[in-house]
Image: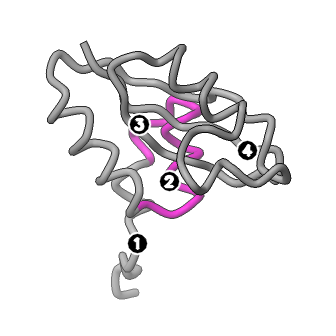
Amino acid sequence: MAWTYILQCADDSFYVGSTVDLERRISQHDRGEGATYTRPRRRRPVRLVWAGEFSRKDDAFAYEKQIQKWGRAKRIALIEGRLGDLPGLARGRSLPPA
């Protein structure tokens, strides 16, 4: 099993990652031993706000990379379970002609 996850940092930013051991990885981030992004004290503590489970590591990693391209509003929609809102929150999407 593998996981894609979103952490909310103490500075209210989001970090997106993937792992095969979710508890261990969150603990690493919280101790400043995780990714470079979560190492600064101003970003800790971190809080898990979303996680999706995958049967394959490469699928979890691919979804991590996809979410990393998303804007804040789209990430929040995923966190809140508003999956129907995701397509409309795509970056660069223009409004239909009036």
Residue type at tag 4: Cys
Dominant secondary structure of the residues highlighted in magenta in the image: helix
Q: CA gap, disc 3 to disc 1?
A: 16 Å
**Helix, strand or loop for disc 4:** loop
Identity of the residue drawn at 35% across and 80% down:
96
Q: Nearer the viewer, residue 32 or 13?
A: 32
**Helix, strand or loop for disc 2:** helix
Q: Nearer the viewer, mark 3 or mark 4?
A: 4
> If you read the primary sequence from the N terminus, does the residue marked by circle 2 or circle 4 appear first?
4
Q: Which mark is residue 53?
A: none
Residue type at tag 1: Arg
Q: Which mark is residue 74?
A: 2
**Left or right of residue 9, residue 1 in this image:** left
Residue placed under numbered mark 1 in the picture: 91
Is label 3 in contact with label 1 (beta carbons under 8 Å)? no
Is label 1 in contact with label 2 (beta carbons under 8 Å)? yes
Residue 61: image location, x then y, percent: 25, 40
Q: Nearer the viewer, mark 3 or mark 1?
A: 1
Residue placed under numbered mark 3 in the picture: 83
Residue type at tag 3: Leu
Residue bounds of the magenta highlight: 70-85
